[in-house]
Image: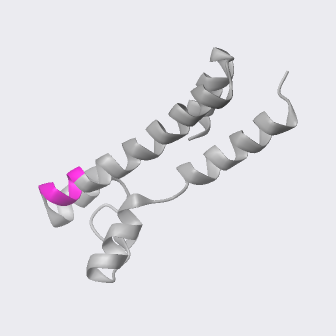
Amino acid sequence: MINSMQFLYLVASYLIGNILTAYIVTKLRHNVDIRDEGSGNPGARNMGRVYGKGYFIATFLGDAIKGAIVITVAKYLFEDPTFIMLTLLAV
């Protein structure tokens, strides 16, 4: 059973997962919306296709770091491995 602290952590994990790394990078560097470029997908592959390998790597690492931080914090706060896997799905 999930308690209120775990529920709030899942909601926070979901919200963190909804941060679009590609969108932030292109807005800061080029002041454009990546969703209007290339395939329209705000992911690492589209970033690489439109702007090159460096942007692919930056977007991929940004997305991976989001997940790694959420999982690492979940491991320290909660001991239930099932909940930690659920957190991974939320990101």
Q: Residue sitting at 51 percent across and 58 percent down?
A: 19
Q: Residue sitting at 31 percent across and 54 percent down?
A: 59
Percent coordinates x, y for residue 53 in the rendering: 13, 55
Number of callouts in the render? 0
Q: Does 51 sit left or right of 78 as displayed?
A: left
What is the magenta range?
53-57
Q: Looking at this view, is 21 or 77 the one in front?
A: 77
Percent coordinates x, y for residue 74 in the rendering: 61, 32
Residue 1 lies, with reference to residue 56, above or below; the image says: above
Determine the residue located farthest toward the front in the rendered image.
Answer: 76
Q: Does 71 sit left or right of 53 as displayed?
A: right
Instruction: Report which quarter residue 29 is drawn in.
Output: bottom left
Instruction: Report which quarter residue 38 is drawn in.
Output: bottom left
Percent coordinates x, y for residue 1 in the rendering: 85, 21
Q: Does 4 sit left or right of 86 as displayed?
A: right
Q: What kind of secondary structure does the magenta stretch mostly adopt?
A: helix
Q: Quadrant of the C terminus?
A: top right
Q: Looking at this view, is 85 or 45 the one in front?
A: 85
Residue 67 is one of the magenta-drawn residues? no
Residue 10 lies, with reference to residue 32, above or below; the image says: above
Q: Residue sitting at 34 percent across and 77 percent down?
A: 28
What colour scheme governs how the chains and residues are painted in the rendered image of this protein?
A: one colour
Q: Residue sitting at 54 percent across and 39 percent down?
A: 70
Q: Looking at this view, is 40 or 82 the one in front?
A: 82
